[in-house]
Amino acid sequence: MFTGIIEELGIVKDIAKEKGNMVITVEASFAAKLKLNESVAHNGACLSVIPQSKKTYKVMAVQETLARTNIKHLKKGSKINLERSMAANGHVDGHFVLGHIDGIVKCTSVRKLQGSHVFTFSCSKSDRNYIVEKGSVALNGASLTIANVTSTSFSVAIIPYTFAHTNFESIKPGDEINIEFDILGKYVVQYMSKSKK
């Protein structure tokens, strides 16, 4: 489990294909501290690590992960949001994030304001069921508050620190972003849909 507070920006050092899967070598400051099969969120997607050196580790993204996330768009040199799993006695500074990506949303606009940026993303009618104004959402693994909602889109406001310390700095209109809806909201929607039958 994660909190959506991005720990650092990792750098993709190498990508290799293996039987339809993608093996990604990532450089991160905490690489030497990782243990075999430890969970790390990569743009919000929970992947098991294979320690490689003091500076790098490897992860494998299987076909299901590639089909559902923007991991398939990574290339050598890409910056990727990283978060190690939370300790049981740790603080939940963001919200409960499982690292199980629900899908991808497309960025439709980026507005620079005085002191912040507003990112708008398109969403489907079914996605709209899980999006609540002032509720939580994880985008590329970052825990964010939904600022505005329409029938076809939603927006989030990004503070300067988050903009500078995540890959939101490089997101532009047309880019696909990983989304994980709030787990509590997903259970409520499922329960309510079953209770109506």
Image: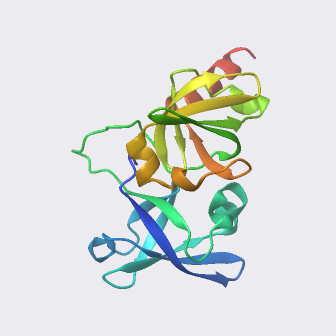
Q: Is residue 132 above or below residue 2?
A: above
Q: Residue at x 46, y 43 (%)?
A: 97
Q: Is residue 135 above or below residue 3?
A: above
Residue 94, horizontal then vertical, whole percent: 38, 37
Instruction: Name the residue at the left extreme.
Output: 89
Side (left or right) of 91 relative to 70: left
Instruction: Name the residue at the top extreme.
Output: 196
Q: Is residue 181 visible?
A: yes
Q: Residue at x 63, y 28 (%)?
A: 130
Side (left or right) of 21 relative to 27: right
Q: Is residue 148 above or below residue 31?
A: above
Quadrant (top left, top right, bottom left, bottom right) of the C terminus: top right
Q: Is residue 147 above or below residue 5?
A: above
Q: Residue at x 66, y 50 (%)?
A: 172
Residue 133, horizontal then vertical, whole percent: 57, 20
Residue 63, horizontal then vertical, whole percent: 70, 67
The foreground one among 125 and 107 is 107
Q: Residue at x 59, y 49 (%)?
A: 101
